[in-house]
Amino acid sequence: MKWETRRHARVKTTTGYIWLLAVMVPNTAFPGPTFEGLGDLPGGFCESEAWGISEDGITVAGWSWSGDPDLGDGPLGFEAMRWDRDTGIQGLGGLPGRPDSRALDVAASGTVVVGWARWANNTSESRAFRWTDVEGMTDLGVFSSDVGFSIAAAVSSDGNTVVGWAREGTSGVWQAFRWRHSTGMQHLTGMPSSPASVASDISADSNVIVGRVGNEPYRWTEDLGPEFLGVIDDVFAETREGVFVSGDGSTIVGSAVEAGTIEPRIGFRWTRAEGFVLLPLPSFARGVHPQAVSYDGSVVVGYTVDDNEYYWVRPFIWDNATGIRNLKDVLIQEYGLCEVAAWSLGYGRGVSADGRSIVGAGVNPDGNGEAWLARLPEPGAAILLADLDGDDAVDLDDFLEPDACLCGPDATPQSCPPEAFADLDCDGDQDLADFARFQVEFTGGM
């Protein structure tokens, strides 16, 4: 069994002290908040990315390097991966002739993964795949011939319906597809043959498929065919990236650009009742890129692009009450996960059905790219960083240690033992700001 660290802190007055104790608890007993890197496959570069997460938040899909790239005619060395708490990171292999593959989504059970893999001896050709723990990786092909490209982007909750896009030959137009066991790969009925179309996501019950035709988002159902959602906004009229749907099919998210331009991009959220609603650009961002949405549409995750010359990307979380927030700030400032400070979290890519488990890809403290998983507590859960003894109260029992660590801003005394250093705001020192957090949490009594 893997273990996680739960931190509690003790804080005293300015004549006392503030300190921190790490208590080890089994991960099955602590639902959040937690944060962890997911590791990488043996071999190749030290790098992994998470792109999808199961509805229950237990299983993650993505890719990792597992071999050194052969820049001639050989494999490039990346491999689809699946991760869960029991087995850790697992390589899924590849299709015949080329081991290179990447996973983009995972079904609710965690036993079905979809994505794309390089095919045969063509270094630039890819095929959509569906992987199961029984059958391994299966090539989903293309529409009619044995020549062409395809990518599987998403899978239904039961793992039996896959959507994505494909094209015949090397010069055809990309077309959205739906794949099922009984039918194989098929065009979505009612879709135009031109311009190009993609299917980028599917509802949990497989009844709603979303994507875009050209630069216009659509919502497709078996009964009605494609419903084109029209112009997003008078200024931000088009979408040129992925479009994603909530598990219940009610909410569609994506990013929009000003017609005829590439930037800036702004996030949008669409429902039948409200139509398009733009997600305002935060002050620190030049672009907002939603990548996933919770089952009921109440939580959106993705990444922002900084409004500076460096184009840094940062994961965000959105809900109607708080708007867009930097996920790293939430994990550190609200939940006291100071270990996150040493990471550059990069991209938010997927979210569980309840909106509490989020995956993405960033740079770890060692400077290597690594997939990560953040779990948030249940809404309304009290986060008491100053509750040392774990009794769900911050009281005089949390007031009993020497004041050696209360040292003031920008100072950490050499004599301060690590287990007594209570940096509640994760700024590297222990001062009155940390004491203020204790005051906020203080419940009184013994």
Image (cartoon, rainbow, N blue to C red):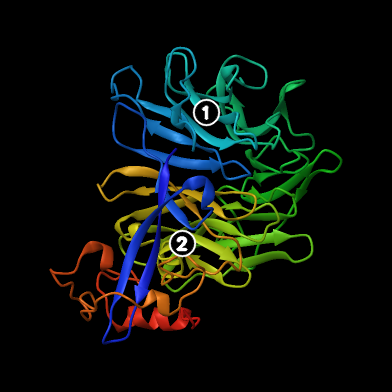
The residue lying toward the viewer, choosing from 153 and 264, is 153
Crowdedness of circle 1 by 10 Å Cα count: few (<14), some, many (20+)? Answer: many
Residue 369, image x, y percentages: 33, 43
Residue at (23%, 80%) from the top-left corner?
A: 409
- Horizontal side of 118 relative to 162 (left or right) equals left
Residue 143 located left or right of residue 205: left
- Name the mark on residue 327: 2
* Residue at the extreme front of the image, as rendered: 446
User: Answer yes or no: do the residues labelled 2 and 1 have beta carbons within 8 Å?
Assistant: no
Residue 281 falls left or right of residue 132: left
Residue 142 visible to an observer of this rendering = yes
| Occupied quadrant, residue 180 | top right
Q: Residues within 10 Å of mark 2 (few under 14, many from 20)?
A: many
Q: Residue at x 75, y 54 (%)?
A: 250
Q: Is residue 311 visible?
A: no
Q: Position of residue 258 (x, y in %)?
A: 55, 62
Element type where label 1 sits in the image: strand
Residue type at mark 1?
A: Trp
Element assignment for label 2: helix
Is 266 located above or below residue 112 in the figure? Answer: below
What separation in Å lies between label 2 and label 1 (alpha carbons)?
A: 29 Å
Residue 116's disc is: 1
Outermost residue on the left side: it is: 414
Q: Is residue 151 left or right of residue 79?
A: right
Q: Check the picture and name the quadrant holding the N terminus.
A: top left
- Reply above or below: 221 against 389: above
- Amino acid type of disc 2? Leu
93 or 163, nearer to the observer: 93
Image coordinates for residue 112, horizontal then vertical, percent: 61, 29
User: Looking at the image, is 268 positioned above or below residue 295?
Assistant: below
Give the foreground label among 2 and 1.
2
Quadrant in which residue 163 is drawn: top right
